[in-house]
Amino acid sequence: MHGLVQFEEVVYKVKLGQPTAGWCDKLSAAASMAVGGSGDAGRKKKAVSAAGSPPAREKTIISGMSGVVRPGEMLAMLGPSGSGKTTLLTALGERHGHGGRALLSGKITYNGQPFSGAVKRRTGFVTQHDVLYPHLTVAETLWYTALLRLPRALCAGEKRAQAEAVARELGLAKVAHSMVGGVRGVRGLSGGERKRVSIGLEMLVDPSLLLLDEPTSGLDSTTAARIVGTLRRMAADGGRTVVVTIHQPSSRLYHMFDKVLLLSADGRPIYYGRAADALSYFAAVGFASPLSLNPADLMLDLANGTPPPPILAQIFIPPLSLSLSIPFHDAFQFIGHTLACMCHSIPCADVIHSPH
């Protein structure tokens, strides 16, 4: 069963009223009522207190979010810190909290149907922070999770085979008998290996929809590329729908994504579409990419209200025919002289203004 995820005009708000009374406040109120707050006087005091409380305010976290993610595709949600990436991800996975203070509106469907228990059982959600028991080995972690999460119809041998298959798929077979670690005094896996174990715990249920919150957080560029490459293969080869939030992807990571959703600092969509088409779109609306800038860097600058310096796009690099018509060392001297002259004319940061 493949998962087609579609969301339309998703808005998430949180009520900002007075905080709920704690147990100390409740005990104090009960004591006051017992001493002298009973009867008409107590009811009048309660009514005056309710009338004097300020009305609840609302804060919009995200608004106007729309998109479609098909089986075999990987969608990356980009945006500055506090833009609502994790909020939208939890909304797609029906994991949003805040109790009665949260207001989620819009339409989210899975294969054209609303979220249900069957969909939740086929959905994997990997949090940003790895929650693993440090004293268990990788094999034990996967095996115990398989015993708890896989259907009772499967025997113990089938569950163990499923755990071993996931370990092989994620490249964890070599560290299967190593402790997870991660706490003081317990040496174990590297950060990338722990992240793959966390992904493996969700892969045990063979999810058609896989949601990951900052899977490359705290990892070096090579390890992050391996993690995203693994997710890319899981989407393309397994026909899964993969949605990730990512803060600052490198150029190599960016080109692994099929689609990109860019959020502004106030939680509004700036761009949604194919990752390969983002630069041409921003160039068409007047924000050309200077030189060989990482597309993700350009998009995050725009999300923060910082357009690229126009002077950088005007630096003249001689065409190949010109560089071949002069001696090799003279060509490099010419390029260096051109760049030096242009750098002297680049304005300071306080001179460059963002458009109104």
Image (cartoon, rainbow, N blue to C red):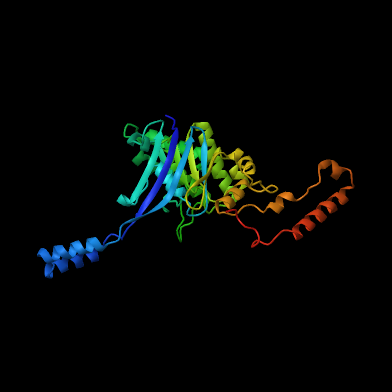
Outermost residue on the left side: it is 39
User: Which quarter of the rendered picture does the C terminus lie within?
Assistant: bottom right
Q: Residue at x 15, y 64 (%)?
A: 44
Q: Quadrant of residue 41?
A: bottom left
Q: State the image coordinates of residue 350 (x, y, percent, origin top left).
A: 64, 63
Q: State the image coordinates of residue 290 (x, y, percent, origin top left).
A: 68, 49
Closest to the observer, 35 or 219: 35
Closest to the observer, 203 or 257: 257
* Horizontal side of residue 328 vs 174, given as left or right: right
User: Which quarter of the rendered picture does the N terminus lie within?
Assistant: top left
Q: Is residue 326 visible?
A: yes
Q: State the image coordinates of residue 24 (x, y, percent, origin top left).
A: 24, 66
**In the rendered image of this protein, does residue 168 appear above or below residue 335?**
above
Outermost residue on the top side: it is 1
Closest to the observer, 173 or 327: 327
Closest to the observer, 164 or 58: 58
Q: Is residue 131 visible?
A: no
Q: State the image coordinates of residue 251 (x, y, percent, origin top left).
A: 62, 46
* Horizontal side of residue 265 vs 331, given as left or right: left
* Horizontal side of residue 323 vs 125, given as left or right: right
* Horizontal side of residue 276 vs 186, given as left or right: right
